[in-house]
Image: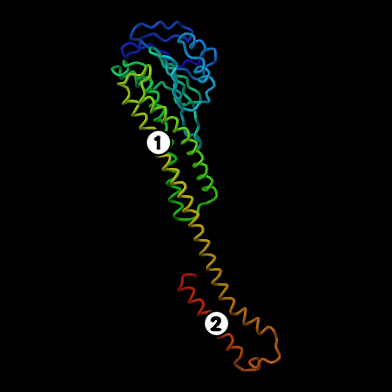
Amino acid sequence: MSVVAASIYRNGRAVPDSSQPPEAPWRLEKGEFVWIGLFEPEEEELLTLAERFGLHPLAVEDARVAHQMPKLEVYGEQLFVVARTARLENDEICYGETAIFVGHNFIITVRHGSARAHSELRKQLETAPERLKHGVDFVLHGVLDFIVDGYAPIIDAIEEEVLALESRSLDCPLEKDEIHRIFRHRQHLMRFSRMLGPMQEMSAKLEHLDLPCVDPEMRPYFRDVHDHVRRVEARVGGLREVLRSVFDVGMLIEQQQQSIVTRKLAAWAAILAVPTAIAGLYGMNFEHMPELTWTYGYPAVLLMILTLCGLLYVRFRKVGWL
């Protein structure tokens, strides 16, 4: 069975011994609602719940396939919400999906690929019966807030590595592996940003629209979820800019070092050109070269080479080429 938990709530408190299998009739009295949590259910289980609670076939199909972007859809007096979960695993952002069916007296959460169960969330919500007695919209807020809060550790971990890369890029050129990590992070953040856009749109609808099963008094709570998504999106945008600047700074420093090496090579080439030119001139073995028979010809030529090379060396040192 894929049912992780299923409880009936009355006045904000779980009714003892109210857990039942999906095929149960789930007889609910006035003021009660049921919260059923499933993890990667079989099609038959979803169809059973769909028949019992009157779930729309299109929503059931979306929950079963589990390849949806975040969205909010209204089917009569019911809501269907899809949210994307995310976690960092081996430097990779892994995504999951949570589909949520919301009716006036029921809420059904269907998780796919999410490593974070709702057990702790359920216990946390049950410690606040005064709020939980608001009903299914409070549980919907709790689930969405739980999902969005899971984004922050991902950004924190990537941010720490990005800051380390930024500090490293100021000291020396980036290595090949570090450049690969920059581009890998940029790709992950770009994909993450594409997911955050629909999440922000969905949370904005919950904040602003008149929707079935959502009390207007809950709008400040959904505004808080919307603000969390916007803050995460802003941090993702900032990290992408930092990664771009880290790469640009690394390339500039590498170009600067290459320029320094090129200048040094050019300076030494110019210095060595003096003895090369003079030696090449005398290596031609012309017949009429009077200084060849001069007693001081050889030391005079050496002195001239050393003097010219010394002047060039001093000049290049002065301009910072050596």
Residue 136's x, y, as percent?
A: 37, 17
Question: Rounded to the nearest whole Å, what is the CA distance between mark 2 and mark 1?
Answer: 66 Å
Residue 284's x, y, as percent?
A: 69, 84
Residue appearing at x 70%, y 88% in the figure: 286
Residue 69 lies, with reference to residue 19, above or below; the image says below
- How many residues crowd around disc 1 within 10 Å: few (fewer than 14), some, or many (20 or more)? many
Determine which of the numbered discs, if any, sits on residue 124 in the image: none
Residue 259 lies, with reference to residue 245, above or below; the image says below
- How many residues crowd around disc 2 within 10 Å: few (fewer than 14), some, or many (20 or more)? some
Residue 119's x, y, as percent?
A: 41, 20
Determine which of the numbered discs, if any, sits on residue 232 in the image: 1
Residue 158's x, y, as percent?
A: 44, 40
Determine which of the numbered discs, if any, sits on residue 306 in the image: 2
Helix, strand or loop at disc 1? Answer: helix
Are the residues tagged 2 and 1 within 8 Å (C-beta)? no
Given the current orientation, which residue lies at the most extreme left position?
130
Label 2 sits on what residue type? Answer: Leu
Residue appearing at x 51%, y 57% in the figure: 254
Q: 111 or 200, which is in the foreground?
A: 200
Viewer-side label of 2, 1: 1
Residue 210 lies, with reference to residue 22, above or below; the image says below
Residue 197 falls in which quadrant of the image?
Answer: top left
